[in-house]
Structures are given as structure tokens and as C-alpha cells.
Image (tube, rainbow, N blue to C red):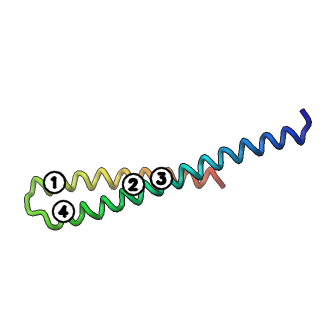
Amino acid sequence: MKTKALVKIAQQLIDNVKKEQIDEIESLKVILKELKKKKRLLKEKLENEKDTDKCLDIQRKLDVLSSQRKKGLSLIKKLNKTES
């Protein structure tokens, strides 16, 4: 193969990888928005709840959502860093 053909193939591979990363970032953003919405709803429930057992359960769910969002945000940062 000639050099131009090899460069063209390499460029196509790089473009495919970038497109996959962009798609993954977009899907992560959608998921993070949903998690944020759930977190906000759980915070409202926690404020209105009087039963301590239910409060602890809601707080545990909030902690899980927070850690999931942090992992998602760090993954987006990592993908953005490798993209550029």
C-alpha cells in the first residue's frame, strides 16, 4: 500500500474511535441528568420524612447515587482528556 492509503486508513480508525468516545460521553450525560433528577427527588423525600428508618434508607440511596454520579463525571473527564 502507498503512504496516502495508509494515512487514510489510519485517519478513519482515529475518527471511528473519536466518534465512539463522543457517543459514550453523550450517553453518560443523559444518565447523569437522570441520576441528578433522582437525587433531587430523594432529597425532597428525605426532608419530608419523619420516620428515622426510612430516613436512613433514603440517605443510603442518596449516598449510592452520589457515588455513581462521581464515577460518571470522572469517566467523562477521562474521556474528554483522551479525546483532545
Residue 14 badge: none
- Mark 2 or 3, closer to the camera: 3
Question: Is residue 14 found left or right of 68 in the rendered image?
Answer: right
* Quarter placement of the C terminus: bottom right
Q: Tag 2's secondary structure?
A: helix
Crowding near the residue tagged with mark 3, few <14, some 14–19, many ≥20 C-alpha atoms within 10 Å: some
The residue under label 4 is 46
Dot 3 amino acid type: Leu
Dot 1 amino acid type: Leu
Q: CA distance from mark 2 to mark 4?
A: 19 Å
Q: CA distance from mark 3 to mark 1?
A: 28 Å
The residue under label 1 is 56
Crowding near the residue tagged with mark 4, few <14, some 14–19, many ≥20 C-alpha atoms within 10 Å: some
Residue 34 position in % (x across, y down)? 38, 57
Dot 4 amino acid type: Leu
Q: CA distance from mark 2 to mark 3?
A: 10 Å
The residue under label 3 is 28
Crowding near the residue tagged with mark 1, few <14, some 14–19, many ≥20 C-alpha atoms within 10 Å: few
The residue under label 2 is 69
